[in-house]
Amino acid sequence: MKAIVQEAYGSSSVLKFRDIGLPVVKDDEVLVRVRAASVHPDVWHVVTGQPYVLRLMGSGLRRPRNPVPGTDMAGVVESTGARATRFRPGDEVFGETLRSMQWKNGGAYAEYVAVPEANLAPKPANVSFEQAATVATAGLIALMNMPPGPYGDVLVNGAAGGVGSIALQVAKARRGTVTGVEHPGKLDLVRALGADHLIDCTKEDFTRRGERYDLIVDVPGNHTFAEVRRVLRPTGTYVLIGHDHYGAAGRKVLGSLPRFGKLMAQSMVNRQLPKPTRSLPPKQDMMEELRGLLESGRLTPVIDRAFPLAETAAALRYLAEGTARGRVVVTP
Ligand SMILES: NC(=O)c1ccc[n+]([C@@H]2O[C@H](COP(=O)([O-])OP(=O)(O)OC[C@H]3O[C@@H](n4cnc5c(N)ncnc54)[C@H](OP(=O)(O)O)[C@@H]3O)[C@@H](O)[C@H]2O)c1
């Protein structure tokens, strides 16, 4: 099959378009013929091998253990493993290829990928393969971090991005009144996604306004928790998603991990921070929730641009420029 192969960490030029063998399908996996796969910041992290700590966290010390990047996709079931019973050949599906954390290559940038069946959901007919391909990894991050609804006043910082656009739409579906914070060129997209109020981050600092929020989902993390608390109600929740801005944040060794560690420690004494020990719904249930949101039209992924699989390196460079208005995908 045709695939993108990464034999070293480095710039996007390490990505080569090659012929390789089909993936081995484990008993609980499904072989999917990929129709589209998403390009997102965590792919950039594993291609560059930054922050360096990810190499110790299972990605591979000197080079990626799995040479084929990509963690989420949509496609058509080709065959099923001996113990995989939920899908049949010909079913249209979407999902995440990785069993655990996202800082690893997941094999989605190829014509075929083997995926644990619990990580898949049926692709609703009302969304394209390109749209469905962008939902799993960003959507699972949003759902894992957001407390259960219904919500009151919600602020999403970075509301046009991969995770922010899903958090915004999940918050609306859970009956929140949503304020979206973004750069001016993306505010019309944030409005189209359903935000009730808009803040231009180049003109206003949301931590210095009079409004108060019950939930703040913060993707760029450009304010300290002490600053954000000024506008968080005492019973509210602050969720940091984090973004290293393709290396511009300068945290080459540990990335945002020290900041997450500090918030986790503070969560022991501060109820506005989610506890690391909280129980999370199983992935299959979260995939089912994302499927339902897509099918009912309450979650609509916006595609900025699709690149052919052979041009994945260009797609990654385009993503890192930060000008995309919507999601970037590659198609085999
Ligand atoms: N998307 C995925 O599928 C996915 C999957 C796994 C993990 N993650 C992780 O989740 C995090 C977020 O990823 P993402 O995909 O949501 O990133 P993203 O698509 O780049 O979204 C971030 C958004 O925040 C905006 N922004 C930047 N600075 C801002 C500021 N000061 N105020 C308001 N908005 C600002 C960005 O605008 P500009 O681009 O114009 O700066 C961008 O629209 C990353 O750490 C990533 O590794 C994402």
Image (cartoon, helix red, strand yellow):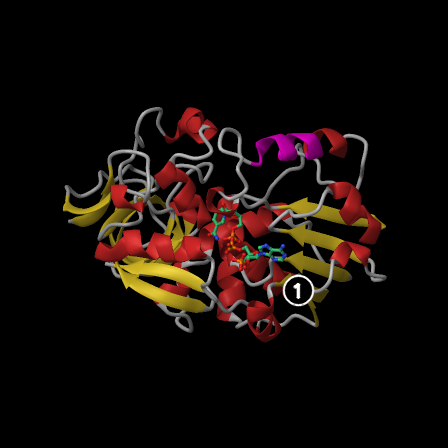
Q: Position of residue 274 (x, y in %)?
A: 71, 40
Image: 152 above or below 10:
below
Image: 24 above or below 141:
above
Q: Position of residue 11 (x, y in %)?
A: 33, 42
Rendered-image quadrant of the C terminus: bottom left
Residue found at x 43% / y 37%: 103
Q: Position of residue 60 (x, y in %)?
A: 35, 27
- Whether residue 247 appears in magenta in the rendering, the answer is no
Left or right of 141, for residue 319 = left
- Whether residue 257 appears in magenta in the rendering, the answer is yes
Q: Secondary structure at mark 1?
A: strand
Residue range (magenta): 256-263
Callout count = 1
Find disc 1 in the rendering and name its residue: 180
Left or right of 140, for residue 55 = left
Give 261 or 49, whichever is nearer the viewer. 49
Left or right of 260, for residue 10 = left
